[in-house]
């Protein structure tokens, strides 16, 4: 990793005049998965336990290395991936990769797996990114191997043993490391768990430097027999917008040959206005509606404002919750039959 030598003696000598800055020809960051995953992106994907984070993480890695489109997104540029797993048995991880790979084209870029299980079998220490030594080891490898431009960490809890999750200071060293990787041109995606509130577990400061925060949640009416299936929702998308960021249902289903294939339902965002208004009318909070519908907070706010302005909902005031007007109940209450 490149050495940072010193602090400038006079910072104004290295500061850039704004006029000069606007004229600079700066290199564009390469798009890896359009529109949300770029060179140097910092991304968190989180969900409850057991929803399918590792299936999704492996799918993203395979999409990036094979060029196969995933979800509502296209791969613009294949890239090498270093996938660090802190939890899975090597045998189970091997089986998952085999099942997913069977329905995909061959890899066009390196896909390297650093398995904690295999490390233990070789009498090596587990990966622990709390450790400066481990962080430097990973950075040095990525600096030396320019063909690997993506790092996936699965999952944060297993790879940061002993961290005080609710203390921002405990995260600061890792946060600075992630920013250093960004400066190196490495895109980082880490998988994480939800906390009791339903948001990502631990300090909110973890999200400050991130470009993308994505939540995976259980779809309405989901049954365990359906396998890995979840709603993909963007909660933060710095500098990115468009229909490709609308929530959608993503699944990994068994094929007739016994392998696994990706499935994607069309965006669920445009067709849930009536359900959102109906749930708002019964006093449901945005958090409860997100859990049921898989929509974004912005979508709820937009429909709430429209329904109040058009006389379908009444805002109770300080609580921030709503109730139906008679007009709203007559028009929207029947949509609650699905819930």
Image (tube, rainbow, N blue to C red):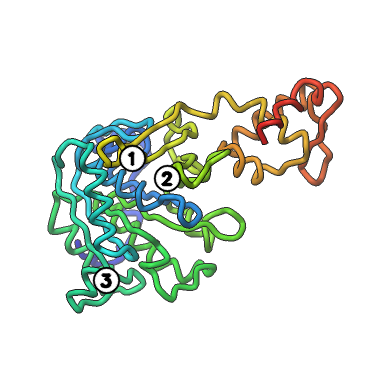
- For the C terminus, the quadrant is top right
Whether residues under marks 3 and 1 lie with C-beta atoms below 8 angstroms apart, the answer is: no
Could you tell which of marks 1 and 2 lies nearer the N-terminus? Answer: 2
Whether residues under marks 1 and 2 lie with C-beta atoms below 8 angstroms apart, the answer is: yes
The residue nearer to you, when weighing 89 against 223, is 223
Where residue 337 appears, as percent x and y from the top left, is 70, 31
Whether residues under marks 3 and 2 lie with C-beta atoms below 8 angstroms apart, the answer is: no
Q: Residues within 10 Å of mark 1 (few under 14, many from 20)?
A: some
Could you tell which of marks 3 and 2 lies nearer the N-terminus? Answer: 3
Query: Which of the two discs, 3 and 2, sits closer to the camera?
Result: 2
Q: Residues within 10 Å of mark 3 (few under 14, many from 20)?
A: some
Task: Tell me the element at label 1.
Answer: strand
Residue drawn at point x = 22 percent, y = 43 percent: 101
Q: Is residue 40 visible?
A: yes
* Mark carried by residue 134: 3
**Looking at this rendering, what residue extends furthest in the bottom direction?**
123
Task: Tell me the element at label 3.
Answer: helix
The residue nearer to you, when weighing 308 against 218, is 218
Residue drawn at point x = 52 percent, y = 69 percent: 167
Task: Tell me the element at label 2.
Answer: loop
Residue drawn at point x = 18 percent, y = 55 percent: 112
Where residue 248 appears, as percent x and y from the top left, is 47, 33
List the residue tagged with mark 1.
Answer: 254
Where residue 162 appears, as percent x and y from the top left, is 43, 76
Q: Residues within 10 Å of mark 2 (few under 14, many from 20)?
A: some
Could you tell which of marks 3 and 1 lies nearer the N-terminus? Answer: 3
List the residue tagged with mark 2.
Answer: 227
**Distance from the alpha carbon under mark 3 to that under mark 2:** 35 Å
């Amino acid at each position: 990793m490149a050495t940072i030598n010193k602090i400038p003696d006079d910072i104004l000598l290295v500061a850039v005049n704004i006029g000069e800055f606007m004229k600079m020809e700066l290199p564009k960051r390469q798009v890896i998965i359009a529109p949300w995953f770029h060179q140097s992106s910092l991304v968190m994907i989180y969900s409850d336990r057991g929803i399918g984070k590792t299936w999704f993480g492996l799918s993203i890695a395979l999409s990036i290395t094979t060029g196969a489109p995933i979800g509502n997104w296209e791969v613009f540029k294949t890239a090498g991936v270093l996938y660090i797993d802190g939890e899975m048995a090597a045998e189970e991880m091997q089986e998952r990769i085999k099942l997913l790979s069977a329905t995909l084209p061959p890899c066009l870029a390196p896909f390297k797996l650093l398995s904690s299980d295999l490390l233990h079998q070789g009498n090596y220490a587990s990966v622990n990114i709390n450790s400066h030594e481990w962080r430097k080891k990973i950075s040095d490898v990525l600096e030396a191997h320019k063909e690997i431009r993506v790092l996936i960490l699965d999952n944060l809890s297993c790879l940061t043993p002993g961290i005080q999750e609710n203390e921002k200071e405990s995260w600061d060293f890792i946060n600075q490391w992630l920013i250093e990787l960004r400066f190196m041109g490495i895109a980082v995606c880490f998988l994480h768990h939800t906390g009791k509130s339903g948001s990502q577990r631990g300090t909110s400061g973890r999200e400050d430097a991130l470009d993308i925060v994505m939540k995976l949640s259980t779809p309405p009416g989901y049954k365990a027999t359906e396998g890995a299936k979840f709603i993909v929702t963007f909660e933060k998308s710095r500098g990115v917008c468009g229909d490709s960021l609308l929530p959608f249902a993503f699944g990994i289903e068994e094929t007739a040959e016994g392998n696994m294939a990706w499935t994607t339902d069309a965006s669920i965002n445009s067709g849930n206005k009536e359900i959102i208004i109906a749930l708002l009318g019964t006093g449901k909070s945005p958090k409860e509606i997100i859990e049921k519908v898989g929509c974004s907070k912005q979508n709820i706010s937009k429909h709430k404002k429209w329904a109040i302005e058009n006389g379908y909902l009444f805002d109770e005031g300080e609580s921030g919750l709503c109730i139906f007007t008679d007009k709203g109940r007559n028009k929207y209450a029947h949509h609650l039959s699905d819930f």
